[in-house]
Image (cartoon, rainbow, N blue to C red):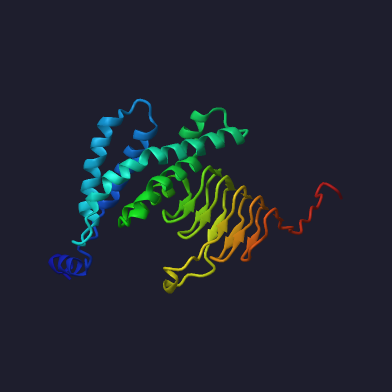
């Protein structure tokens, strides 16, 4: 097969005219600038808001290829929501600083906590998801996922404050509902019982009520599963059914310890 034939076959099989990887690159640039605009004291707000608007307009033109979806019109309303989003994120950061003994300052939380970064990008993407903006919300959270190991679908509903400790391996599904003052540790999954395209419009991820703590590697599955308020879910627990408020759920594995120094 000659090179011309190979090129023709590749071109023939590039079937998606709107599949442009520049969308991903531009979304990541936009997300980074948005984060710095909100938090970095040396980043000038007014100047960057103008730059963000231009970046958003470029993104809107790339992702809204259906003519009946005027995505550019979203920007002004999104901009009006930014102060409230920032208030929520400041509460998240303050709660982490006040409750985590490893945090030496709130600045440390903003600069070094992967869980906070993942929450921040989730909250910033969630509003775009609510507006129905295609692709961009998911690409924003996937950007955070790649950097932090924390996978939060932009469709999830998450209260304030929210704390993800250590962050790595956390998965929060699209229809999960998390109420105020919830804390989860690394490796926690809030997922669906099974995957079926027919369930697209159905709640398939759990509800976590207020003041719940979920320890490392716990798995909670199912749209009808509710963790009652003020409950503690222990590490490595597997749940597919609801638990009442004030519950303590634990997993007790059998551990055998052998002293190899004895003869």
Q: Is residue 235 left or right of residue 151?
A: right
Q: Is residue 257 left or right of residue 76?
A: right
Kindly identify the residue that appears in the image at 80 percent across and 50 percent down.
260
Q: Is residue 219 left or right of residue 69?
A: right
**Can see residue 16?**
yes
Outermost residue, left direction? 4
Residue 58, given in percent of the width and then of the height, sits at 21, 47
Residue 200, given in percent of the width and then of the height, sits at 42, 68
Kindly identify the residue that appears in the image at 51 percent across and 39 percent down.
92
Residue 208 position by quadrant: bottom right
Q: Quadrant location of the N terminus?
A: bottom left
Residue 50, given in percent of the width and then of the height, sits at 23, 36
Kindly identify the residue that appears in the image at 20 percent across and 52 percent down.
61
**Can see residue 26?**
no
Q: How many marks?
A: 0
**Could you say which is closer to the camera, residue 105 or residue 21?**
105
Residue 178, given in percent of the width and then of the height, sits at 53, 53
Kindly identify the residue that appears in the image at 20 percent across and 62 percent down.
68
Compared to residue 223, the image places residue 97 above or below, namely above
**Could you say which is closer to the camera, residue 110 or residue 255?**
110
């Amino acid at each position: 097969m000659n090179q011309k034939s190979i090129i023709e076959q590749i071109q023939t099989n590039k079937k998606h005219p709107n599949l442009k990887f520049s969308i991903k690159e531009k979304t990541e640039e936009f997300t980074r600038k948005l984060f710095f605009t909100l938090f970095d004291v040396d980043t000038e707000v007014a100047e960057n808001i103008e730059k963000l608007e231009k970046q958003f307009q470029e993104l809107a033109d790339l992702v809204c290829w259906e003519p009946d979806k005027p995505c550019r019109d979203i920007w002004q309303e999104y901009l009006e929501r930014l102060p409230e989003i920032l208030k929520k994120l400041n509460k998240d950061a303050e709660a982490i600083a006040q409750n985590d003994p490893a945090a030496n300052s709130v600045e440390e939380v903003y600069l070094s906590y992967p869980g906070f970064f993942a929450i921040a990008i989730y909250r910033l993407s969630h509003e775009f998801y609510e507006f129905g903006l295609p692709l961009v919300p998911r690409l924003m959270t996937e950007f955070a996922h790649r950097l932090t190991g924390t996978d939060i679908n932009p469709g999830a509903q998450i209260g304030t404050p929210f704390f993800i400790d250590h962050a790595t391996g956390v998965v929060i599904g699209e229809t999960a509902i998390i109420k105020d003052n919830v804390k989860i540790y690394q490796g926690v999954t809030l997922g669906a019982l099974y995957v079926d395209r027919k369930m697209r419009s159905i709640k398939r991820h759990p509800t976590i009520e207020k003041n719940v703590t979920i320890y490392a590697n716990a798995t909670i599955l199912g749209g009808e599963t509710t963790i009652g308020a003020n409950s503690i879910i222990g590490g490595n627990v597997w749940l597919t059914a609801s638990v009442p408020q004030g519950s303590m759920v634990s997993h007790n594995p059998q551990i055998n310890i052998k002293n190899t120094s004895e003869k």
